[in-house]
Image (cartoon, rainbow, N blue to C red):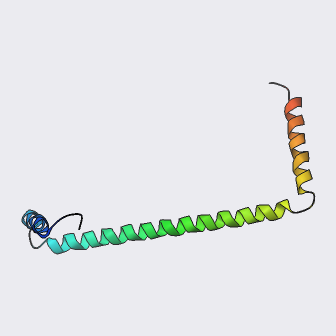
Amino acid sequence: MFGLGLPEILVILVIILLLFGAKRLPQIGEGLGKTVRELKKIRDEKRADKEKGEEEKSVISDLKNQVEKIPGVKEVKEIKETADKVKNITRFPK
């Protein structure tokens, strides 16, 4: 356990017992347990969000590939790019 032996753990427990008293130890343990559960819950939620995000990226990539296969899409993009270039050239400075 983090490189701590039995004597070190016992010393730590005795110090905690002296600082907080026997009546407060169950409350401290309960609070520590709740904290650990919350941290695990947050970690699991982040993992789920990350997996969901990767899945969405995959779906979006697949849709883009399918759209590229539609006849005329490439030509429409080229026309739009050309129109944007013409618009930028003909724009008058303010």
Name the residue rendered at 90%, 52% in the picture.
76
Q: Which of the pair 3/74 is nearer the observer?
A: 3
Left or right: where 54 falls relative to 87: left
Q: Pick the quarter of the image with the C terminus.
A: top right
Report which quarter residue 52 is drawn in.
Answer: bottom right
Note whether 15 is above or below 76 in the view shown: below
Q: Which of the pair 23/38 is nearer the observer?
A: 38
Report which quarter residue 68 is drawn in.
Answer: bottom right
Q: Where is residue 3 in the image (x, y as percent from the top left)?
A: 21, 63
Tally of marks:
0
Note whether 50 is above or below 82 in the view shown: below
Q: Pick the quarter of the image with the N terminus.
A: bottom left
Name the residue rendered at 37%, 67% in the picture.
39
Left or right: where 53 falls relative to 28: right
Name the residue rendered at 85%, 26% in the picture.
92
Q: Which of the pair 27/70 is nearer the observer?
A: 70
Name the residue rendered at 32%, 69% in the picture.
36
Q: Position of residue 33 (x, y in %)?
A: 28, 72
Specify the farthest residue to the top.
94
Left or right: where 94 falls relative to 24: right
Left or right: where 92 falls relative to 16: right
Q: Which of the pair 48/22 is nearer the observer?
A: 48
Q: Position of residue 74 (x, y in %)?
A: 88, 53
